[in-house]
Image: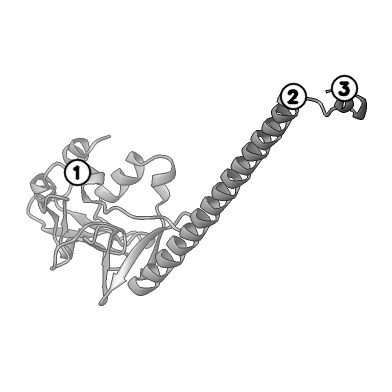
Amino acid sequence: MGIDDARKNDDTDDDSEELVNNNKFSKRKRLSKKRIMQIPDFEYDEIQGDFEADETGKFMLVQKNGKLFDKKGRMVNRRGYMVDKDGNVITRLGKLVFYNHEISPDDDELPEPYCYEKIRGLRGPKSDLQFKITNYNTLFEDKEKKLAAERQIEEEMEEARRKKHAEKQASKQNRQDDEESSMSEIQAPPPMREEEEEFI
């Protein structure tokens, strides 16, 4: 069932602007049929920010000056949706998709039926996206530590390469020296005996 199917099957009153679902387990806002028809076609990847994952697999939202950002510095909400300065959900190209008041205030999730469509469309690892808010300074320090550790490993590997090269050169030089000494022994005339010296 796609977005267009959800629009066709929606039985809400055309005149109602927005409804709150009365189900006690769901606090998602439900859009009117009229508003659903106004929503532009979009893919969920178009409104989702880009994130790095930590060692536990949670995506990191970067917090700076009280606002959340993805790894490319674009403003996002707690669910990782890209937002403008007013909190409206937008695409990567800046096209408005959902107004701020249509988003769930509890967890920044999309209104019905889009929140359910997302879950159906993202089977597998993306269907259970988990986010972790990371302070910008902490993230920067962690990256610096990681880069420093990587630099140290590279330096140690380079030092090992240099040592191995030096050992190889020394071994090659020793072989050359051994060959030269054995050649000089072969080319040198044998030492004369005392009897032969007297004869000459």
Quarter of image, res 72: bottom left
Which residue carries the number 3 mark? 199
Residue 91 placement (x, y as % from top left): 16, 51
Element type where label 2 sits in the image: helix
Which residue carries the number 2 mark? 186
Marks 2 and 1 sit apart, C-alpha to C-alpha, by 101 Å
Marks 2 and 3 sit apart, C-alpha to C-alpha, by 25 Å
Numbered badge on residue 49: none
Q: Residues within 10 Å of mark 1 (few under 14, many from 20)?
A: some
Do the residues bearing badges 1 and 3 touch, measured as CB atoms within 8 Å? no
> Can you name the residue that lies furthest to the bottom here?
65
Seen in the image, is 17 located left or right of residue 164? left
Residue drawn at 14 percent across, 41 percent down: 41
Q: Can you see residue 26?
A: yes
**Amino acid type at mark 3:** Phe
Q: Quadrant of the C terminus?
A: top right
**Amino acid type at mark 2:** Ile
Residue 7 placement (x, y as % from top left): 17, 41
Seen in the image, is 177 located left or right of residue 95? right
Element type where label 1 sits in the image: loop
Q: Residues within 10 Å of mark 3 (few under 14, many from 20)?
A: few
Residue 11 placement (x, y as % from top left): 18, 45
Q: Residues within 10 Å of mark 2 (few under 14, many from 20)?
A: few
- The first of marks 2 and 3 along the sequence is 2
- The first of marks 2 and 1 along the sequence is 1
Which residue carries the number 1 mark? 10
Nearer the observer, 34 or 67: 67
Quarter of image, res 3: top left
Marks 1 and 3 sit apart, C-alpha to C-alpha, by 126 Å
Element type where label 3 sits in the image: helix
- The first of marks 1 and 3 along the sequence is 1
Residue 183 placement (x, y as % from top left): 70, 27
